[in-house]
Image: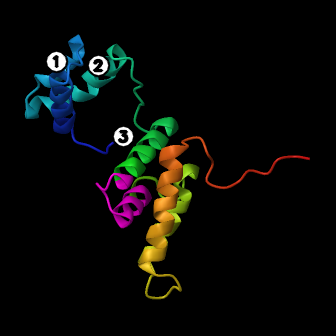
């Protein structure tokens, strides 16, 4: 989904082989040079993931965008990203268009207007963390409650 470079995919394939995960396409991925990676990863990755029983999401696929957003949320919760970094990346990648992450994009806007708003950076970060937990823990939970008839 554009979150990592092709060379990082090759490194991950190497790590997977070292960890005992194996498939023919994974071996080919792991053997690519950095120059080959940019050209060959897009073709080999779907095959390698399929051989491993994993889902491949084509670029632009909404389910893939949601999976990438959930992965970013988990990275923030693991301490790899700050709350500010998370909302900036989500907002940059998806704007306000992805319903699942719309609130995170709005929180990025709030960070941008801190000096004019009535909330502190710590308050916004706390809400970002709550949203990240929602995304990471319950991937199918909508951002806003849905009205139910009757």
- Which residue was labeled with disc 3? 1
Instruction: Report the disc number at residue 48.
Output: 2
Which residues are drawn in magenta?
A: 76-91
Residue 70: image location, x then y, percent? 45, 45
The picture quadrant where one finds residue 79 is bottom left
Q: Residue furthest top?
A: 24
Residue 49: image location, x then y, percent? 33, 21
Left/right placement of residue 23 relative to residue 106 reads: left
Whether tag 1 and tag 2 are in contact, CB under 8 A, the answer is yes
Earlier sequence position, callout 3 versus callout 1: 3
Earlier sequence position, callout 2 versus callout 3: 3
Observer-nearest of 34 and 18: 18
Does 119 appear above or below 57?
below
Left/right placement of residue 23 relative to residue 92 reads: left
Q: CA distance from mark 3 to mark 1?
A: 21 Å
Residue 128 colored magenta? no
């Amino acid at each position: 989904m554009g979150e990592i470079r092709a060379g990082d995919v090759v490194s991950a394939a190497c790590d997977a082989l070292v960890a005992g995960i194996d498939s023919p396409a994974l071996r080919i991925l792991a053997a690519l040079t950095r120059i080959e990676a940019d050209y060959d990863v897009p073709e080999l990755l779907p095959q390698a993931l399929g051989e491993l029983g994993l889902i491949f999401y084509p670029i632009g696929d909404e389910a893939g965008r949601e999976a990438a957003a959930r992965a970013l949320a988990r990275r923030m919760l693991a301490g790899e990203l700050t709350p500010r970094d998370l909302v900036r990346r989500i907002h940059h990648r998806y704007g306000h268009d992805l319903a699942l992450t719309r609130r995170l994009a709005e929180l990025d806007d709030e960070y941008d207007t801190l000096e004019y708003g009535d909330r502190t950076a710590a308050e916004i970060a706390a809400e970002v963390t709550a949203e990240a937990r929602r995304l990471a823990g319950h991937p199918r939970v909508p951002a806003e409650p849905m009205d139910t008839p009757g």
